Amino acid sequence: MTIQVVAGLVVFLGAYVLIATEKLPRATVALTGGALMVLLGATDEAGIFFSEEAGIDWHVIFLLLGMMMIVGILRQSGAFEYLAIWAAKRARGRPFVVMAMLIVITAMLSAALDNVTTVLLVAPVTLLIADRLGVPPVPFLITQVMASNIGGAATLIGDPPNIIVASRANLTFLDFLEHLTPLVIGLMVVFIGLAWLLFGRRLHHDAERAAKVMALNEREAIKDTRLLITSVAVIALVLAGFALQGVTHLDPAVVALLGAGLLALLTRLEARKVVADVEWETLLFFAGLFVMVGGLVNLGVIDQLGKAATDAVGTNYAGAGVALLVGSALVSGIIDNIPYVATMAPLVADLVHAGGAAAEPLWWALTMGADLGGNATAVGASANVVVLGIARRYGHPISFWEFTKYGLLVTGVTVALSVPYLLIRYF
């Protein structure tokens, strides 16, 4: 092992530790790690910007950018506040029914948009509803973010790890609907039952408080009806574009950017409002992360790991799938699932290349494990970090261990149910 390889591993592992412990902003860490890889000679400008194997994955970056712009414009219409209040009123202020409806709405929005944006917009309204009901908001926030991670697993755009896997494996929007959506629907039914066991029995109905929720007028939440109608129409077109990728041959990133551009044109919003909700820090984090992983690819580290994994697996792809599913869930609970999947994707690609069609289910094992494992701890997924920040800001802090004691149970149950699904469907 050369000094350059050792130095590259030190940079990568050091950055991983800093990202996992959140000692420094993760975008800063990723960009610094990428810069150090350049200084070490592990990559260069051509590799960073133009290499499909070891450079920045622009498909991921621009898909995220386009969807962030679309959702940011939709947010300004008040649609998310409307949905939350509407759900609470349909439940007639009964706390657990409200929780169950918010779980379903959050999961569906996470699948159609993305989980981080969904919780960012729905969580503040959830706090308002919990206050009106006179119930503790923490159980609502915890179940909501877990629903977003489970629901986000259903589609290509629902969770950032899915976007990374789709780009690396050339999977389409319809592929995710076919392979993961049936599992997610079943897991959501089980999750609602878990929510009842964990929280539902402690939530008591108060008729006077429920009346305050019924007094809310969801129509007042809509700030711009024209903007809402236009946004929903464009989102429908974008989702259709994703689904028709096999016909149009347009990459999802292109579809998302076209949708964002069309929506900006139709709404005639100022440029600063169009990009106001773009999470630039997240995009920069992805860019730096891809450069670091690309450095390891260029140094031959990923290739060596791939060969070792191929030798260990042999032709036992069922065993490899279970190990990858469970292992991904465990690791994703310790560190954010985004850097984990970005690192594992080229390794799994080597395994699939060596095994052919028999090894292709390994992509689904990786995706299931990373998405579901994100629920295990407070730092397992980006959505978790976002919701804990919102809870702290509104005076309802959720400690790492409070989240984790529920997260480990939910992750254990959902991963345990996913193992037979993986084996029966693919092996």
Image (cartoon, helix red, strand yellow):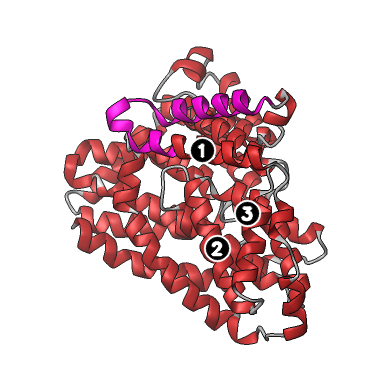
> Residues under labels 3 and 2: Cα distance?
10 Å
Looking at the image, is mark 3 or mark 2 nearer the viewer? 3
Q: Is residue 212 left or right of residue 120?
A: right
**Residue under pointer 1:** 233
Q: Is residue 234 above or below residue 106?
A: above
Q: Amino acid at mark 1?
A: Ala
Residue that badge 3 annotates: 119
Identified at 30% across, 44% down, the residue is 175
Q: Which residues are magenta?
A: 239-268
Labels 2 and 1 touching (C-beta < 8 A): no
Kind of residue at disc 2: Met
Q: 141 or 398: which is nearer to us?
A: 141
Q: Residue at x 34, y 61 (%)?
A: 183
- Residue 146 shows which numbered tag? 2
Q: Nearer the viewer, residue 319 or 69?
A: 69
Query: Residue 307's x, y, as percent?
Result: 28, 38
Q: CA distance from mark 3 to mark 1?
A: 22 Å
Question: Are there few (<14), some (14-19), or many (20+) residues within 10 Å of tag 2?
Answer: many
Give yes or no for residue 242 being in the magenta stretch.
yes
Report the front residue among 405 and 343.
405
- Position of residue 286 in the picture relative to residue 314 (left or right): right
| Residue 280 placement (x, y as % from top left) | 67, 32
| Label located before the other in sequence (2 or 1) | 2
Density class for disc 3 (Cα within 10 Å; few <14, some 14-19, many ≥20) is many
Left or right for 169, reference 412: left
Residue 229 picture location, percent across and down: 58, 40
Spatial CA distance of label 2 from label 1 is: 28 Å
In the picture shown, does residue 100 fall above or below 153?
below
